[in-house]
Image: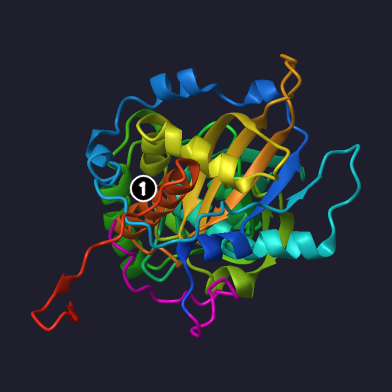
Amino acid sequence: APAPGSHTTPRSQRAREPSSGAPHSLLSIARRTMAATCTAVSAARVTSPTVARSRNGAGTNNLRAAVARPASRRASHARVAPRAVATETATSAPATAAGDTALIDSLRPTSAECAKTLVAIANTGTISTTCEDGIPLGTFASYVVSKEGDVILRMRADAMHTANVTRDPRCSLYVQPATQPPGVLSRATLIGTLSRLDDAAAEKASKQYNETHGENVGVDAVAGSDVYYKFDVDRVFYVGGLGSDKRAEVVSADDFDAAAADPLARIANSVVDAMNGDRYEDVMNFARASLPDEAEPAEARMLWVDQLGFDVRVITSAGDGNSTPGKVLDVRVPFPAPAATQQQALSSLTMLAQVMWEEEKQYQPQPVPRETTDSGEGSD
C-alpha cells in the first residue's frame, strides 16, 4: 500500500507524531499512541455487524475500489499487535486518571476544532431569541459559513425571531448535524449576538446562501426582503460525540475563531460506511489489536474518522461460554500522520489494516534471493 503523503501539521497539532530520529514502523507508532476507553452504554445501542452491512450497503460504490485490500503483503513492520490502554469510565468504576484522559484527548482534535467541524457539517440549527415578555423562543434557522469563517444567518424580515433580535441581539444557535451516524451525537451551542449585514455584504451572503440551500419552499422560501445577520460568537458550549469523544466544555471565542474545521468532515460518513460494510473484517481487526490481552471483541463498528485517526465502538465477549454481552469499549486509533485528504485517510486505513492482517496471520516474508556476479559477490 502506498505510504501517506506529506502532511502539513495543523495549528493545534500537539505531540502526536514520533521524533525524526531512528526509523519507526507503523505498528510501533500505533502501539505507543493507541488508547481505549470503557463506556457504560447499553450493548443494544451498538448496531450488529449484519445490520451495519445492510444499512451501509448503499452509497459506498465510489469508495470500494479505494478501500480494496492491497494485493501485496510486504512485511516491513513488527509482528506484535498494538495494545490499548483501557480506562474505566463507567459510573461504578474509579475515575479516569488524569494522565489517561490527557493521552486520549491528545489523539483527537480539540473541542474548538470539533465545534468548528460541527458548524461546517450542518447548515441549519435552532436559534433561541428573547421575546418581549422575557421568554426564550427557539426557532428553526439556516445559515452559511463564509470564507472568513463567519456564521451568516438568513432571516425573514417579518419573522418573530427577527423582531426579537432587533430588540435584543443576544441569542444562541444550537447545531447538531442530522447526518451523524448512530452513536455519534455531538452538538455545539454558539452563544453571542447578531449584527445585521450591510447591503453589499448581504448581497454576497445571499449568493452563497442560494448556492448552498437553494430557494426553498413555503415559509422558508427565499424572498427579496430577507435580511442577513452575522453571528458574533462570545463563547461556544461543545458536547462531545464525534466518535468516542466524551468531552463537554465551554470554548472561548478566541479558540473557536482560531480553530479550523476538520478537512475530512465532508467525506467522513462515506469512509465510515465503506469500512463498516466492505471492510468490516478490518474494523474487527482494528478492535482486536487495540484491546487489552484479556479482551476479545464480539462486535465492532467504526464511528467516525478525522484527520488524526478514527473511533471504533466494540462489544467484548463475556467469555466462559456466557451469552451475556461483555463491556462496551470505545477505542481511539490514531493515524501515523495527519490525513488532510480522503486519499491520505484511506491510505492510512489500508496500511493499518495490512499490518493487523499480517500480525493475525503471523505472516513471515520470504527472503528475496540476491543475484550474484561471476566473482560471487552479491549485487542489487
- Say which amino acid is labelled 1: Ile
Query: How packed is label 1: few (under 14 Cα within 10 Å), some, or many (20 or more)?
Result: few
Image quadrant holding the C terminus, namely: bottom left
Number of numbered tags placed on the structure image: 1
As drawn, which residue projects farthest toward the left?
A: 374
Residue 287 at x, y percent in the picture: 57, 41
Residues drawn in magenta: 1-22
Image quadrant holding the N terminus, namely: bottom left
Residue 314 at x, y percent in the picture: 62, 35
- Magenta stretch encompasses residue 20: yes
- Magenta stretch encompasses residue 268: no
Residue occupying image coordinates x 74% and y 65%: 102
Mark 1 sits on what residue? 267
Q: Would you say the magenta stretch is mainly helix, strand or loop?
A: loop
Residue 313 at x, y percent in the picture: 60, 37
Q: Quadrant of residue 41?
A: top right
